[in-house]
Image (cartoon, helix red, strand yellow):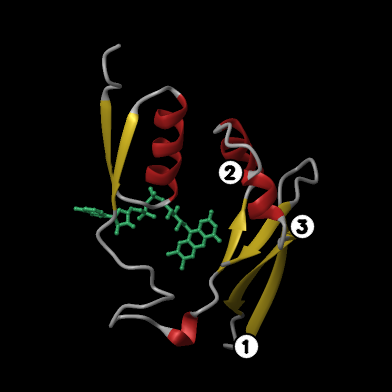
């Protein structure tokens, strides 16, 4: 049998990581290259002050991960998440005072999952 064709993904952000999973699911041998170190750990440029990065995961992000077809992956990601239904826009009024304006997610009550990495 011929060896699987190789797919090279450059960039390990959300799009690269998902593309790598989708390609692997289709049977390709995947190589993923990421330029930067994990900002949380181990490098000279590590930022202990931002060691926890809160990340909002949208409904479509959740669907995209589920459809990657990796057993247990979505559960692992969502395990420590909590739902958020509102985001806050911070702005200033005409007098320079800070104004916080809540804005709901999605017209049909879609709820995001907030996950801290
Ligand atoms: C402050 C901030 C907060 C955000 N919060 C959220 C949030 O809570 N939820 C959310 O959904 N989105 C959030 N976003 C948006 C989100 O970060 C982007 O939409 C998302 O990262 C885009 O993904 P991407 O894979 O297209 O690009 P990127 O995440 O930019 O990934 C590209 C990757 O490619 C790597 N790369 C570049 N050149 C090379 C190279 N030559 N070789 C190897 N690797 C390379 C880069 O290092 C990078 O890691 C936030 C953005 C910012 C700035």
The vertical placement of 69 against 57, above or below, is above
At horizontal 70% and vertical 48% (from top left) the residue drawn is 75
Please provide percent x and percent y for residue 29: 32, 31
3 and 1 marks in contact (CB < 8 Å): no
Give the distance between the C-alpha atoms of the residues marked 2 and 3, in whole angstroms: 15 Å
Give the distance between the C-alpha atoms of the residues marked 3 and 1, in whole angstroms: 25 Å
Crowding around mark 3 (Cα neighbors within 10 Å: few <14, some 14 to 19, many 20+) is some
The vertical placement of 99 against 38, above or below, is below
Viewer-side label of 2, 1: 2
Return the residue at label 2.
61
Furthest-front residue in this view: 1
Give the side of residue 14 with respect to residue 97, left or right: left
Crowding around mark 2 (Cα neighbors within 10 Å: few <14, some 14 to 19, many 20+) is some
Return the residue at label 1.
97
What secondary structure is found at the residue carrying circle 2?
A: helix
- Taking depth in this image into account, of 45 and 55 the one nearest to the observer is 45
Quadrant of the rendering where the N terminus is positioned: top left
The vertical placement of 29 against 112, above or below, is above
Upstream in the sequence, badge 2 or badge 3? 2
Give the side of residue 63 with respect to residue 31, left or right: right
Crowding around mark 1 (Cα neighbors within 10 Å: few <14, some 14 to 19, many 20+) is few
What secondary structure is found at the residue carrying circle 1?
A: loop
At horizontal 75% and vertical 43% (from top left) the residue drawn is 107
Return the residue at label 3.
85
Quadrant of the rendering where the C terminus is positioned: bottom right
Please provide percent x and percent y for residue 43: 31, 78
Residue 34 occupies which quadrant of the picture? bottom left
Image quadrant of ligand 1 equals bottom left
Residue 89 occupies which quadrant of the picture? bottom right
Q: Is mark 2 within 8 Å of ligand 1?
A: yes
Viewer-side label of 3, 1: 3
What secondary structure is found at the residue carrying circle 3?
A: loop
């Amino acid at each position: 049998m011929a060896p699987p064709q190789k797919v090279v993904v450059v960039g390990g952000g959300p799009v690269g990581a998902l593309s790598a999973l989708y390609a692997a699911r289709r049977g390709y041998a995947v190589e993923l290259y990421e330029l930067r170190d994990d900002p949380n750990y181990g490098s000279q440029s590590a930022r202990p002050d931002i060691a926890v990065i809160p990340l909002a995961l949208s409904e479509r992000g959740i669907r995209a991960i589920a459809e990657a077809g990796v057993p247990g992956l979505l559960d692992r990601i969502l395990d420590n998440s909590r739902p958020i239904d509102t985001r806050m826009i911070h702005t200033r009024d005409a007098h320079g005072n800070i104004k916080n304006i809540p804005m709901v997610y999605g017209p049909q009550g879609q709820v995001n999952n907030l996950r801290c990495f």
